[in-house]
Amino acid sequence: MKAKEGVLDILNKVLVSELTAVHQYLLHAALCKHWGYGRLHAHFSHLSQEEVSHSSGLIDHILYLGGAPEMGHLDAVAAGKKVSELLAADLAFEREDADVLRQGIAHCAKVGDFTTRHRLEDMIIDTEEHIDWFETQLRTIEQVGEERYLAEQLTADKS
């Protein structure tokens, strides 16, 4: 199948963002593990796996449309010296990702690529859930203080 105008550019932009997210969440998982925050380590590890799944689906879809997946670079990966910095960086990252996805959805609707639009709509659901989670974590830190918040992050949830 041949891609409609501009769709491959959008998909590759989203792919770079998703691949960057994989690396950022892997880094944040490792930092939280190193700092002893098992619960956050588990959550960031889960997020990185979600982003791997999104990346894989995007790669398949780009190839299906006759394009070449952009695998040559990543955006900047944010780090931090404390958990609240990681959470704030991830919130900003997810908000930017949501903007890119919304633009992609609008473009796909405009050019009549409803398959790609549907894929991006599925992805934005996860992105908005991530935004909500990061906002909740930062609001909790603001309400109870970082020390109390981090005390709850020491052990991973038992599931």
Image (spheres, helix red, strand yellow):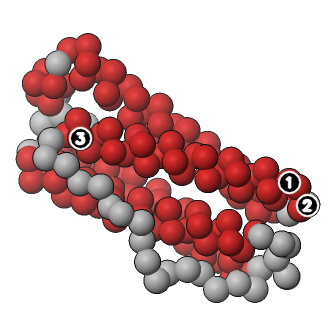
Q: Position of residue 112 (x, y in %)?
A: 91, 60
- Asked if residue 56 lies left or right of residue 79, the reply is right
Asked whether residue 29 is in view, the answer is no
Residue 153 can be seen, yes or no: yes
Q: Position of residue 37 (x, y in %)?
A: 14, 42
Which mark is first along the chain, 3 or 1?
Answer: 3
Amino acid tagged 1: Ala
Residue bearing mark 1:
109
Label 1, secondary structure: give it.
helix
Image disc number at residue 85 = 3
> Residue 8: image x %, image y %?
71, 74
Type of the residue with mark 3 = Glu
Q: How far apart are labels 2 and 3 at the CA level?
A: 40 Å
**Crowding near the residue tagged with mark 3, few <14, some 14–19, many ≥20 C-alpha atoms within 10 Å:** some
Q: Is 82 rendered above or below residue 97?
A: above
Q: Quadrant of residue 43?
A: top left
* In this picture, residue 35 sits left or right of residue 50: left
Residue 61 is tagged as none
Give the residue type at disc 2: Gly
Farthest top residue?
143
